[in-house]
Image (cartoon, rainbow, N blue to C red):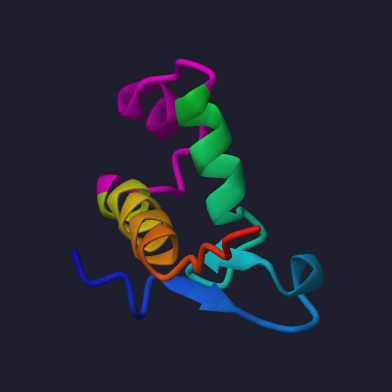
Amino acid sequence: MNYQGIITIEPGKRSGKACIRGMRMTVYDVLSYLASGMTQAEILADFPYLTREDILACLSYAADREQKTLTVAA
């Protein structure tokens, strides 16, 4: 999924963390809800301003960040 245009980073908002569509909801927030066991449907019910595409964009962004993570041997 192409998350550009959905995931935004603004230096003055949430300390420059990756947010969803310029809102104060961060990618980390959504990933934390998913990791705690919430379903996409539960997240969407609790946060009606989010869309399924927003959640998928968060997952895609996280996967992309993981792919770019550099591992340094000790």
Residue 29 in the magenta stretch? The answer is: no
**Residue 40 versus residue 50 in the image, above or below:** above
Residue at 66 percent across and 58 percent down: it is: 74
| Residue 46 percent location from the top left of the image | 51, 28
The quadrant of the image that shows the N terminus is bottom left
**Residue 1 versus residue 10 in the image, above or below:** above
| Residue 58 percent location from the top left of the image | 40, 54
Residue at the limit of the structure toward the front, as seen here: 74
13 or 17: nearer the viewer: 17
Magenta region: 36-52
73 or 31: nearer the viewer: 73
Residue at 33 percent across and 48 percent down: it is: 51
| Residue 13 percent location from the top left of the image | 75, 73
Lateral position of residue 11 relative to residue 4, left or right: right
Residue at the limit of the structure toward the left, as seen here: 1
Which of the 4 quarters of the picture holds residue 63? bottom left
Residue at 52 percent across and 62 percent down: it is: 71
